[in-house]
Image (cartoon, rainbow, N blue to C red):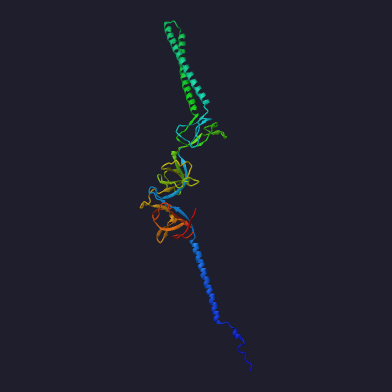
Amino acid sequence: MIPSNKQNKPSLSDLKIDPSLKVHKKERKLSLLVISGIVLIVVMSALGLMLREGPVEVATAVVQKYQPDQGLTILNASGYVEARRKATVAAKITGKVMELFVEEGMRVKEGQVLARLDDREAKARYESSRAELKVTLARIKELEVNLKDAGRDLSRSKDLFSQGVASQENLDKAKAAVDRYRAQLSYLGEEVQAARARVVVAERDLENCTIGSPFGGIVISKDAQIGEIVSPVSAGGGFTRTGIATIVDMDSLEIEVDVNESYIANVKIGQKVIATLDAYPDWKIPATVRTLIPSADRQKATVKVRIAFDELDPRILPDMGVKVAFTTGGVASQENAQAVVVPKAAIREDGGRSVVFVVKNDVVERRAVKTGSAAGDTIEVLAGLVDGEQVVVSGSGELNDGRKVVVKK
């Protein structure tokens, strides 16, 4: 009997996939998707955290101490240091420079000799005029003697005529001689006055050869050299100078700024100003508005304002660039003697409270502050800040306590 192999022969039913295996494969795919999603979320979170924690570029401002007598800034302007007394000293006559006694930077006194011109011709004219005066005076003395002699002749002629000895003709000649000498004396008297006037003119011409300083100050420019021709008027060409030196009275230095006519209503005579020279940006110079020029510039739509320094300093020089801040003059709150001022842009609102971000060691610190009066672009801070600290006024990203920052240069 042959054994049957029916049971060992594979059938089509044996080729079917086990349903349990399908379930396992789906579970594995789902698990891979879940794991990939989790990894992606972790990576994105880490990347976001890295981006969020990276340094943010910010602009800052320095906290400044509030001065009650200065007030808060309401207007800013720029201009230059000018001198009310400034003169280019020139000669009154045309002449050649023979001696020059000035150099740039030299301090001179009123009347101090700056230069001397060639005075040889002036001296000759002066001596000639004096000689003419002497000759005229000598002729007067001669005529006075002749007049006395003619007077005596006239007296004798009268006596002789009364005695019948002298004729009428002799008497008339004696009278004519007296009248002639008197007329000559009168004429020479006028000549003397004219001669004396010529002496004065020649003396002035001689004095004009010596050029002195009209006031005390500092020489800022030497405009002529020895050997050059100077003249009170330009003669054309490049060989004739019209000035010897330029002198500035350093005690008359002031600031001149142009204020837009739209804001001129904020400027008053006597108003306090804080000036900052471009050469010394950390030096705050107190000043006061001296006058407003009662005329506007049609082209620039500005009004000139002149400001006097409260106290002059040798560091202040003519034509220096200067920035000025017009202040409220102390009208702001004085509740706290330690009050400071910051730009309004530094103050932020957070939950109904005013806060600022203070930069220390390239990290920001969130700090609550108490604010006071505001004026212009600045605001008074009564508590929470001290003079000299650095606060954020703008930034390229979100700020939070402890965030690293990079300060714009």
Q: Is residue 269 above or below residue 129?
A: below
Seen as rendered, the residue at the extreme right is 2
Looking at this view, name the residue that lies furthest to the left: 335
Is 9 placed left or right of 264 in the picture? Answer: right
Q: Is residue 273 visible?
A: yes
Give the farthest residue toward the bottom. Answer: 1
Q: How many marks?
A: 0
Vertical position of residue 409 compared to residue 45: above or below: above
Where residue 276 appears, as percent x and y from the top left, is 45, 46
Residue situated in front as seen by the camera: 348 or 144: 348
When the figure is inspected, residue 357 is found, relative to residue 138, above or below; the finding is: below
**Residue 153 at what x, y percent from top left?**
44, 10
User: As drawn, is 38 to the left or to the right of 69?
Assistant: right
Q: Whole-percent x and y of residue 138?
A: 47, 17
Residue appearing at x 51%, y 25% in the figure: 123
Out of 126 and 46, give the one closest to the viewer: 46
Task: Find residue 240 and report its image quarter.
Answer: top right
**Depth check: 129 or 371 in front?**
371
Task: Name the residue at 54% across, 81% down.
Answer: 20
| x and y percentages locating residue 101 in the rendered image | 50, 32
Whether residue 260 is visible here, answered yes or no, is no
Q: Quadrant of the N terminus?
A: bottom right
